Image (spheres, grey):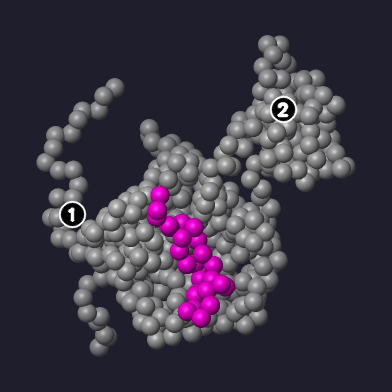
Amino acid sequence: MADIIDGVSHTFNEFLLIPRLTTKDCTHGNISLTTYLTKVSDKCDLDAMRLNIPMVSAAMQSVSDARMAIALAQEGGLSFIYCSQSIEEQCKMVRSVKLYKAGFVASDTTLSPKDTVATAMRLRAKTGHSTIAITENGCNNDILVGLVTSKDLRLSRIDPNDSLDKYMTPIDKLVVAYEGISLHEANDIIWRHKLNCLPIIDRNKRLKYLTFRKDYDASKKYTSQLVDAQKRLMVGAAINTWDYMDRVPALIDAGADILCVDSSDGYSEYQFDAIKMIKNKYGDKIKIGGGNIVYPDAFNYLVEAGADFVKVGIGGGSICITREQKGIGRGQASAIIDIARERDALYQRTGVYIPICADGGIVHDYHISLAIAMGADFVMLGRYFARFDESPGKKTHIGNQVVKEHWGEGTKRSANWSRYLDTGRPDIIFEEGVDSFVPYVGGLDENLQITLAKLKSAMISCGAKTINDFQKNALLTIVSPSSIVEGGAHDLVSRPMME
Ligand code: RVP
């Protein structure tokens, strides 16, 4: 007969934190959210990678593209760019994160002088950007010949069939700067000449970037950016276990800072072989995480393969139906607690600490605090990030509600990229994910600041100034179903909705 493990498996909702003594020095300003991302040993932690906030975005088509990766790294977190796309496309995304320079924007609204006003209006509506760079042939990296701004197209008698050269400010009347200029210097020029936009060109007059007055102040607010030794934003990339021989060297070449194997069940010989081979061949160039797993035996297996961190969670993801389809998985809280105990025991025995990532099933902000208190070093989120402007999903309406698309990596929609390519990827026979929507909530920055403030407040209540203190000091309690009801607003008459 099969073994049955003792006890039931629990989810986040069944736990709460008990306050510990809050000392007076435990203030928002004194809290550090820095956490380990990769393996660290007592003997040497110089080599270990860290995050400045304990949050990474899921390797999913509807979550982590270059735009999300830039926005999250600016806040101190990290995105894992999804691998359900061709190696070339994934490398292109990684490259554009590594090439990103705060305040220097590659124009996405570029046309030629012969394009019409009507084309310009359509493009502006599509990109949401009002400044149009005009280059000789209408492409970026081509010779800049002028600029069209909102002011130029505000004249009363504009014929939509007119060409843009009639309205643009030509290059000889524009203030421009040359590639190599710092953002600080660019800003000085913007203020001195009272500009809204300063184009940056190279010595051959080719358009490289646009810098905007409004972006300078924005770039100053990112004090926790996650950057590499050359001050470039950091970015992770997911890989699979069938084309990693080609994908990994290409991703390293593109500048990826860290890899993780993306699999709903990481306790496999395929994953062991992949991690081992990558560590042997590229271990001096890049780190790699493994997963997903839910039980300590699998943790030890991936650590033996050489994993630099391990991802925990099967079937808890918002779009994930692995538990319903295959009957495989475990309550996320129990999985984290058991694996964190195993990780701590390994550390006691060997002095080697393997960070664990709680992946999936985070619904409320306080679940992040719980996951960390249970022993996770950082959390991976899909649904959370999919709700923001920066996610790749399309924004649409369902009734009066504004929503964004969000779909699982285990859906046919995600798997479709490989259908006509010779990738060796097995066909999906049944889906382990759903194609759905999440409520749209606005920009990443404003929402993330609220989430982080709640995390810090929970740490303050538990008398912890660091993630490590929090994991050590936390006292958790399992709650009964009726105390969950007691915890929300209850026994009230709701206010009627006002017009
Ligand atoms: P959530 O944050 O609850 O949206 O969960 C995100 C996680 O769900 C991902 O990081 C991944 O582990 C898992 N996932 C992604 N796609 C699927 C699926 O199609 N079943 N599951």
Which residue is at the front of the view, 213 or 166? 213
- At label 1, the amino acid type is Ile
> 185 or 159: which is nearer to us?
185
Q: Residue at x 61, y 30 (%)?
A: 125
- Is residue 44 highlighted in magenta? yes
Residue at screen point 65% across, 41% down: 103
For numbered disc 1, what is the local secondary structure? Answer: helix
Q: Is residue 54 left or right of residue 469?
A: right
Q: Nearer the viewer, mark 1 or mark 2?
A: 2
The image shows residue 80 at horizontal and vertical percentages of: 54, 60
Q: Say whether residue 148 is left or right of residue 322.
A: right
| Coordinates of residue 372 in the picture (x, y in percent) | 36, 63
Q: Residue at x 37, y 78 (%)?
A: 344
25 to 283, vertically: above or below: above
Residue type beneath disc 2: Arg
Which numbered circle lies on residue 167?
none
Instruction: Return the residue at label 2.
Output: 192
Asked if residue 19 can be seen in this view, the reply is yes
Q: Quadrant of residue 171?
A: top right
Determine if the magenta segment contains residue 160.
Answer: no
Q: Give the left or right position of residue 51, taking residue 67 as reference.
A: left
Residue labelled 1 has its Cβ within 8 Å of some atom of ligand 1: no
In the picture, the quarter occupied by the N terminus is bottom left
Find the residue positioned furthest to the bottom. 1
Helix, strand or loop at label 2? It is helix
| Span of residues in magenta | 29-53
Residue named by callout 1: 484
Marks 1 and 2, how far apart at CA:
59 Å
The image shows a total of numbered marks equal to 2
Nearer to me, 304 or 26: 26
- Residue 301 picture location, percent across and down: 45, 83
Query: Is mark 1 in CB contact (under 8 Å) with mark 2?
Result: no
